[in-house]
Structures are given as C-alpha cells and as structure tokens.
Image (cartoon, grey):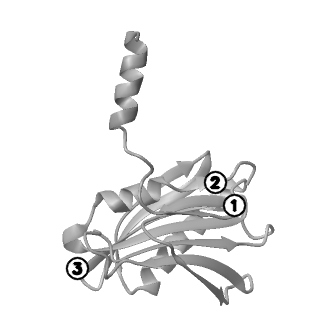
Amino acid sequence: MNILTLLLTAFCLTAPLQENGYLLQTDHYSILFPQKPTPQDQTVDSKIGPLHIHMQIYDASNAVGDGNVAYSVAETQYPDTSISSDRTDKLDKFFEATVNGAVNNVKGKLLSVAPIQLNGYPGRFLRIDYQDGVAVITMRAFLVKSTLYMMQTIAYTKNDHNAASEAFMKSFRLKTGK
C-alpha cells in the first residue's frame, strides 16, 4: 500500500459521514435543515401588487441541543419590471426596503447589516434584536434575477452566533442556471 492510499484511507475513516439533517431540494435551490421543514405559503399586498411567498419553516424550539429556536427559508418572485439583480441602480433601495421590512415586521432593532454575494448575485447579511434582547434573528437575503431568497434563524441571545445557524446559512445552494 503506498502512502497516498494510506492517507486517503485514513481520511475516509475519520471523515464524518453525511451530516445529520434534511436536505430540502426545490427546482431552484437546496438547503440543509436540521429536520424536515413545514411548507407555508403566504400572499402579501405590496406597492407593486400581491407577492407570493413560499416558505419552509422548521420549529426547533423543542429540539434538544439545538442553538436555535427556528429555521426558515423564503422564496419570493417579484415582477421582472419592478426589480432584478441586473438593475444595479435599484438594488440599494430594494435591499434597504427589505431590511426595514424585516425589522419592522418583528418590531425589532437592527443590530447590523452588510452587503454579501452568492454566485455573483447581490445580497445582505443582517442581524435583528428581537423582543428587546430576548432573541436574535440572523438573516441572509439574496436577489437572484427577480427572485428574493431569504434564510433566517432565530436564537435566544445567549445562543447567538452558533455553529448550527452558520451551517444552515452556508448550506444554501442555487441550482445551476437559476
């Protein structure tokens, strides 16, 4: 047995098998939840007309050893005429409205916001204080063409910045060509 085979064998024996969780796969993306999420659809009225939001939510409030209370991903299709990731002149206002909407919807306080990217598509990473210090909402939002994808976790403040939240966020993958 040569040294390369020995090293590869040792690595394979010590490498973890597949991560625990539920790999959610849609036509547009995949993401690894700790357990199978529940789908939920909602239509909201907006200045540009009704918007359909397709969500997947996992309630982790009773999960033993999980640093988060909830996990979710939402997909919202906007009319091509209102916003697109190609229309860079409108992106700052779009993300400002998205962040403000997220903060106002939970009556929270914005802790931080920063520009991010996914496969060259623009996005924002934000953290929101929820219920005056009880919990923190961590969120990543990406605009892919005219579709907004938002991943979020909610954790009690003492569990903020946990590895499970980071792993969930990093597991989000766009399907090729979407």
Q: How many marks?
A: 3
20 and 122: which is toward the camera: 20
Which residue is located at x 35 percent, y 82 percent? 108
Query: Amino acid under label 1?
Result: His
* Position of 154 relative to 23 (above/below): below
Query: Amino acid under label 2?
Result: Leu
Which image quadrant is residue 75 in?
A: bottom right
2 and 103: which is toward the camera: 2
Q: Nearer the viewer, mark 3 or mark 2?
A: 2
Quadrant for the C terminus in the image: bottom right
Q: Earlier in the sequence, mark 1 or mark 3?
A: 1
Q: Which residue is mark 3?
A: 133
Q: Which residue is mark 1?
A: 28
Residue 91: image location, x then y, percent: 62, 60
1 and 2 marks in contact (CB < 8 Å): yes
Which image quadrant is residue 110 in?
A: bottom left
The residues bearing labels 1 and 2 have C-alpha atoms spaced at a distance of: 6 Å
Q: Residues within 10 Å of mark 2 (few under 14, many from 20)?
A: some
Q: Earlier in the sequence, mark 1 or mark 2?
A: 1
Per the image, label 3 sits on a secondary structure element best described as loop
Per the image, label 1 sits on a secondary structure element best described as loop
The residues bearing labels 1 and 3 have C-alpha atoms spaced at a distance of: 35 Å
* Position of 5 relative to 78 (above/below): above
Which residue is located at x 36 percent, y 35 percent? 13
* Position of 62 relative to 112 (above/below): below
Q: Residues within 10 Å of mark 3 (few under 14, many from 20)?
A: few
Q: Which residue is mark 2?
A: 174
Q: Nearer the viewer, mark 1 or mark 3?
A: 1
